[in-house]
Amino acid sequence: MSKKNNENANLKAKCRSKTEKNIKTCYYPGCNEESINSHILQKNGVLNKIAKDAHLWEIIVDEYSTERFVFKRKGLNKIFSFNCFCNHHDSSLFKQIESKTLDFTNYKTNLLFTLRTLYNEIFKKQKNIKIKECLIKENPNKFDIDETLKTINDENLAIKDLQIIEQKILHDLNSSDETFVFNYREIDDIGLCLSSFFTYDTTEEIEKAEAEIGKELDRYSEIFINIFPYENKAILMTAYEKIDKSKVENYINDFYNTDPKICYQKITNLALFNCENWVINDDFYANNVKGIEDKFIEVVNFALYENSANKDERKNFDINFYEKDFKDKFKNLEIK
Ligand SMILES: [Zn+2]
């Protein structure tokens, strides 16, 4: 790494670590208490069920790597966690989903899983904004200011959209209204936990629609998804807003097809091309990742990183984490 690149990497790493600690107010509306570090999916009963020696793997940003991302094995206390609620709200709100047996037919159980996923998305966006602000402040000459300000603006708009969904979730939690459609099914447990949201509309579709009406779309259709071990299987749970039903239903139905292969292929494509928020255990790493780490990182850069080249996020490739030939197929996959 050249001296200049190394200085940039140092600065980015510094801003990144500073920022993480600076988002520390409880997300519950109106609460100003300090937030505690909590897990996106419960540490005890979910993450520890798939972990070996209390460790899991995730893809992290590494400013010193030329590819920007690397796989890292991390301890359970630190992985898949963020500063979310204060102690009071963390324990009072989520009591219902901290118990051993969960009732997935219960609307509020599903809402609570979705709420934590949503706050984690807001957290990640706020973190990104703060990192960019820190970079400009520390050394305005080193970074493309226009580009950086555009990212900050985009992230702020995305947070506003998420806050609209947040209000709907909180409204439903405190009433008998049901604004969302939840689905769940049992699937095989392969040592994967995923908690994320993604926009159903592809970049290509959004650009086309916006060109037609000559302005930005008022809203996108967002889908929330969780995958986690439960009893001896795993649960797949999806959520979307009722108003999007006719639009997204066919896409969602594939996840619930009686042929699990169709569901598993969808999950694989989703994890690789649409959601970066997942962790895996040692077995998953050995079976599906080891030796082809570069391919995963290539896909992250192609599909998930800022200004990525991928415009057709729902494209479905013939790859499947749940089958033995995944590594061979993925290794040779032409993604562009
Ligand atoms: Zn609070």
Image (spheres, rainbow, N blue to C red):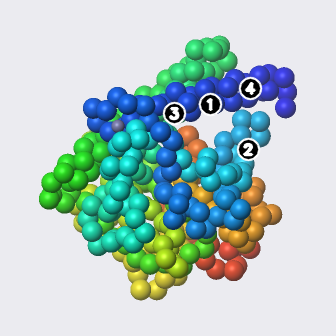
| Residue placed under numbered mark 3 in the picture | 127
Q: Residues within 10 Å of mark 3 (few under 14, many from 20)?
A: many
Mark 1 burial class by Cα count in 10 Å: few <14, some 14-19, many 20+: many
Q: Quadrant of the N terminus?
A: top right
How far apart marks 3 and 1 lie (CA) works out to: 8 Å
Q: Label 3, secondary structure: give it.
A: helix
Query: How far apart are labels 4 and 1 at the CA level?
Result: 10 Å
Please tell me whether mark 2 sits on a helix, a strand or a loop. loop
Check residue 16 in the rendering and tell me which mark sits there, or answer none.
1
Whether label 2 lies within 8 Å of ligand 1 gets the answer no
From the viewer's side, name the closer residue of 92 and 3. Answer: 92
The picture places residue 197, in percent across and down from the top left corner, at 43, 53
Q: Type of residue at label 1?
A: Arg
Q: Residue at x 66, y 46 (%)?
A: 60
Q: Is residue 290 above or below residue 11?
A: below
> Type of residue at label 4?
Asn
Q: Quarter-wise, where is residue 290 in the image?
A: bottom right
Instruction: Choose between 135 and 113: the one closer to the eye.
Output: 113
What amino acid is labelled 3 in the image? Answer: Lys
Q: Which mark is residue 286?
A: none
Residue 214 location (% of width, % of height): 29, 38
As displayed, is residue 224 above or below residue 213? Answer: below
CA gap between label 3 and label 4 equals 17 Å
Residue 10 has which mark? 4
Can residue 273 be seen? no
